[in-house]
Image (spheres, rainbow, N blue to C red):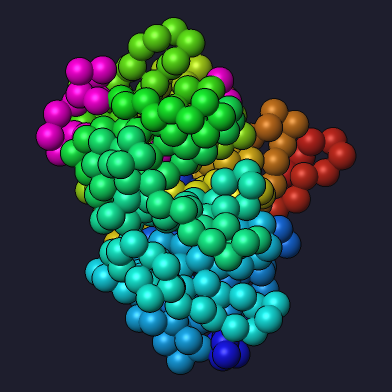
Amino acid sequence: MLGQPKRVKSGFPRIKDGASENLFQFGLDQGLSGTVYTAFAQDKNGALWIGTDVGLCSFDGEYCETYSVAQGLSPSFVTNFLVDRQGQKWIRYGDQLGISVLNERTGTIKHLSTAGGLSNKRVWALMEDNKGRIWVGTEEGVNVIDPKTDSVKYITKTQGLRGNDVYGPIFQDSRGRIWVGVFEKGIDLIDEKTGTVKHIAPQHGLGNGLNELIQDLSEDKSGRMWLGTWGGGVRMIDERAGRIKSLTTAHGLGNDRIISFAFDEKGSAWIGTYGTGVDVFDTKAQTIKHLRTAQGLNNDIVLSVFADKQHQIWIGTEGGEANVYNTASGNIHHLSSRNGLNNGSAFYFGFAQDSQARTWVGSFGGGVDVLDENTGTMKNITSTNGLLYPDINFLLTDSRGRIWVNS
């Protein structure tokens, strides 16, 4: 039986001190249980699920709930998971611990290992196909679990795989084909309609050695497959054009060790790297924007990137807090005395905007700062050039365009 989750009222996300981007921190203070964020998923009700080093957490916008060992998980460290169409959570652990299936509706948790039909206890990948079957990548091939018939089908070298160690991810594309990452063997492409397995290997442009270790697989809106590799950057497979393109440090990436990526509503790719944060690749402009600790990330070792239904990008790192970036709200710029404000303190009481779209900011002891974003200039008004007192409480714009200052 599944135990009742630990339920905590969530606090508000916060912006990291000194951040230059609208990256919000969401962690222990907001109700999450751990500090390592390995995976994200969203269920049909909109709740966000987060895999951590201290269990599996859900966030519904108001409360955080955590399932850990006390509720029935095998260990507390969740390496990866998926939410199937029935709402069940298939949980993968590290080492040789198999998987667990958490069912909130029935209040049960089931553990699957070799005794339950898996070919191997070391599980690397999980994926649900369009028929509701769960594909499990192990050290001894792929296990295809059909929950409807409670049966398992095995796909190994005997059935055409190049290797049995399915270390990389498993992904189903828009044509229904299954992409399988095989340890140091590249990619196997399974087409169940034709009963064939196609191999994409080094000679096709994937790279060599460790560069063939596929960490993530995804498909963009144009049908191109994106492969994140360990040491070889990103590979983009365009089957229509018959070519494989590379995106590496030579093209502007911060790191060639790619762990995870996601696509936002504009089609930009958010690429999580191991050591240099997130690179945002604008596929139209062909430009790269870097998000690192200097811009507000809590850690530059990124373990997971996920785009939710609310136009937010969730970034999981190796330690600290989860990071949330809202792509619809635009950037948040942090202004201080380093950027030209006259007051070095944090006491800013009055704000107003004039007919020229300039922003007037009143501070305690610093007078008024007038920010003109169109020209990128800052003007300071203090007692030395007209104000009666430098301590400003309120600002007001009247119908005639005048600024009233209360000090």
Query: What's drawn in magenta, residue-wise?
Result: 201-222
- Whole-percent x, y for residue 37 in the image: 39, 64
- Whole-percent x, y for residue 217 in the image: 41, 38
Is residue 354 toward the left or the right of residue 188 in the image?
A: right
Relative vertical location of residue 347 with respect to residue 234 in this rendering, above or below:
below
Q: Residue at x 31, y 38 (%)?
A: 161
Is 362 or 167 nearer to us in this picture?
167
Outermost front residue: 158
Is 339 or 136 nearer to us in this picture?
136
Q: Residue at x 14, y 29 (%)?
A: 208
- Whole-percent x, y for residue 348 in the image: 55, 60
Is residue 332 toward the left or the right of residue 277 in the image?
A: right
Is 383 or 358 nearer to us in this picture?
358
User: Can residue 220 be found in the magenta stretch?
Assistant: yes
Relative vertical location of residue 9 with respect to residue 290 in this rendering, above or below:
below
User: Can residue 394 be found in the magenta stretch?
Assistant: no
Is 118 or 385 nearer to us in this picture?
118
Residue 240 visible at all: yes
